Image (cartoon, rainbow, N blue to C red):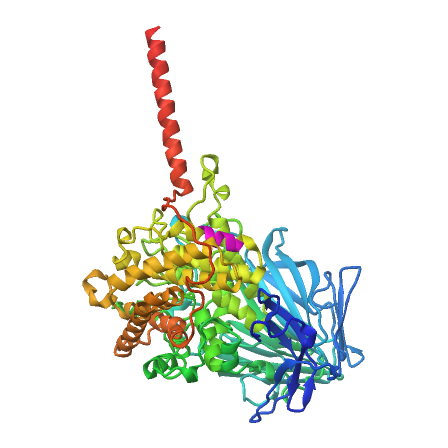
Amino acid sequence: MPLPHGFESDLGSLTLTANTGPVPLQTRVLERWPDSSIRWVLLDFLANWSPGVESTYVLARRSESSDIPTPAHSIAVTEEDTGGVTIDTGVAQFHLSTKTFPFARVVAGGDDVIDAERTALSFIDGQDGPCQLVIERLSVEESGPLRSVALARGSIVDARGRSMAQLTTRLHFFAGSATVKFALTLRNPNRAKHPGGHWDLGDEGSVYFRDVAMTIGLRDDDDQTVLRCSPEPDSPFDPCELPLELYQDSSGGENWKSLNHLDRHRRVSSRFQGYQLRSGVDLRSGLRATPVVFLMQNDRQIAVVCGQFWQNFPKAIEASASAITLRLFPRQSGDAHELQGGEQKTHEFFVAFGLDSVTDLPLDWCRAPLLAAADPSWYATAEAVPYLVPATDAPNPTLTQLVSSAIDGNESFERKREAIDEYGWRHFGDLYADHEACFHAGREQRTSHYNNQYDAVAAFAGQFFRTGDRRWWTLMNDLTAHVIDIDSYHTDRDKSAYNSGLFWHTFHYADADTSTHRSYPGTGSASGGPSSEHNYATGLMLHHFLTGDPSSREAAIGLGRWVLDMDDGRKTVFRWLARGFTGAASATAATDYHGPGRGAANSINALLDAHRLSSDRAFFDKAEQLIRRCIHPADDVEGRDLLDAERRWSYTVFLQALGRYLDRKAELAELDEMLAYARASLLRYAGWMAQHERPYLDRPERLEYPTETWAAQELRKSQVFDFAALHAPEDGRARFVERARFFFDYAIRTLGEMPTRTLTRPMVLVLAYGFMRGAVGRSAKRSGPDDETPSAGFGRPAPFEPQKTTAKRRFLLAAFTLAAVVGFLGLVLGAT
């Protein structure tokens, strides 16, 4: 929950009240305002809800006379000297150990539930060899009365003793519940070899698993076994015969054989549409399963459910007389499961070790979890994001219609997934980049992945704030998971320009082929890897604020650290000849261009996000360094050739980042020379834009592909002018306001008339940049030049020379000098 500036500083002063009165509340600060008041707070509470009945909760300051409600059950956490952890939820006790993972013992209803030896994670490598799990560290990540989290880290070691992969598991425990939520992340920390800059499946850095499974074994074998299964939401919870096996081989969609699912052998290994369910000797099939499996024996009971089961195929769940096995990477698949170098996958599932009283069907609530949301007006008041306006206050009907088409109708993002079957554990959550298929004339559907271009995660979060519509939250959450696991390069064994970076979207107007989400397939001529021009952290930051998920926080901070590392000359082979910055954090379109562009812009944005999340000043200082490197109030703007749209269009992205930096400076109350420098630079470029910029499509002959995306990009110009209006002197503001309105109206009107308006790329631009105009149009200026900021002579622009350029020059100079010396000595020796 976001709180307005100055609302409250003390967590103990917050209280939550339902229709029936105050409810127990667990809180944690996710971010504070610069004055130390709470900006984002994570709320944990036990919600009561009945279908069709609205449940409203009010967060407020607690009065001195009000009582603090105590929960009926409270969690007790004990960290043991042996390295183990015991967590008591009030109705169940869980004993965790590094030697017997995940549990050494589970007690529910006063009785031991599990057989610890048969309750385990198991791993089979691609050669059908068993692997060993070694838990290296077990700790308590979060401890509270209503929810606690245990964190386990370890390695998977093959039969030869070699480490294959890393495992991180978070186990969430809930007060008064015997149900545990597992979030299990399997990571390949190797670098990819990416020969020639191509990133295809089958790379030398990949590792392979035939099977990864979690088995929960009951303590005793007994003939009196009750087994039930509900394979799909709303399906009956029927008794089943033993043994039980439900295997989801494909998405179950019409395009389940899509070439999107090519493996390293260039085959689609799925063998049938949907799932098959074997119960005893009976076999039946279906399309899309999210099964709940329940097993009871002598009053001991367990139930297992894996949300988004079919979406993340292949998956399998099995039951014997005394155990349930959830196969996360199932052995039933037609091929081994490949984790590429630096790739990971997080699997989430729930296990109930006793009576689940939340829903009549055990764990049914896990298939469609509740979502708590504030009213859009509160998100706006609390400034969850700057310039936020609730959707009900947006008067532009064309904009409203454009935005709605992303979640309603045949062109919605959810429906678009079906075109290339954007499902499976590697693909689900990403967006189909349908705009890349517009010029494709082949018979097969072109496979193209969006990979969070222009920060669709942040765009979805913004729309959720504006509307409170759950569908936006779902798009945000699913894409976040994909970006963290698949689009991020989880290694420190490659070069610093790539390590921990973010992979690009599929190469323009090409097929992803076997490069999946890594941009550069071996079938194409282009090659490369992660770079600053595709670095989007803001959505990850907002996801953390909305969920408290530590993974999105770590990912966002990691992208800020990537900027520091990629620009650090001490981490390159050229460090022996030059100690300067590499320029990798600021280059755009070419290694020798370090003016305003999206490379530096995305770096600055990522640094600002990492600073907000970590309070580490090194990130903010680096952002200021990049601003000074790339722009100057005395720049020869005309000489930048900014009207060359194909090469220089993204200077507007930099000016947007500059406006965001100015907002952050104002929040921090840093009214200093750097603020004046950035403001003067923004106004100089915006002044030039007001005189020279026209809509891109007015000059289509200058564009390689004059598509709908160019119309959507006009929204960036509108935002630049809005920022300029906020910072301009009174006598210059009107011109910027007029230009902001013109480019906004042009973009929305032009897009609204185009049949391709709902393609993914222009739609994300609309979602991300379509709402600032409404807020700025009604707000007072924030920080104009009449504020008390230092005035200074900024000198003249100084050209930036990358480390590699300096190193080459020094090498050539040294080589020339050496050749001259050798030549001179030759002459001398020859003369003697």
Q: Of residues 4 and 487, which is closer to you in this image?
A: 4
Seen in the image, is 103 located left or right of residue 416? right
Q: Residue furthest left?
A: 701
Q: Which residues are magenta?
A: 619-625
| Camera-nearest residue between 404 and 153 | 404
Predominant SS of the magenta segment: helix
Task: Decide if residue 243 is on the left or right side of residue 593.
Answer: right
For this rendering, which residue is in front, 605 or 743?
Answer: 743
Which image quadrant is residue 34 in? bottom right
Residue 127: percent from left, percent from top? 55, 58
Q: Is residue 105 magenta?
A: no
Instruction: Estimate the x, y position of residue 697 in percent, counting from the top left.
Output: 23, 68
Side of 704 where 349 appears, left or right: right
Q: Tell me the quarter of the image containing the N terminus.
A: bottom right
Q: Where is residue 574 drawn, in percent x and y? A: 45, 38
Relative to 537, say whether 22 is above or below: below
The residue that appears at 52% across and 49% down in the rendered structure is 493
Residue 423 horizontal/vertical position (percent) = 45, 72
Residue 34 or residue 642, whichever sits in front: 34
* Magenta span includes 621: yes
Seen as rendered, the residue at the extreme top is: 832
Quadrant of the snapshot with the C terminus: top left
Residue 220 visible in the snapshot:
no
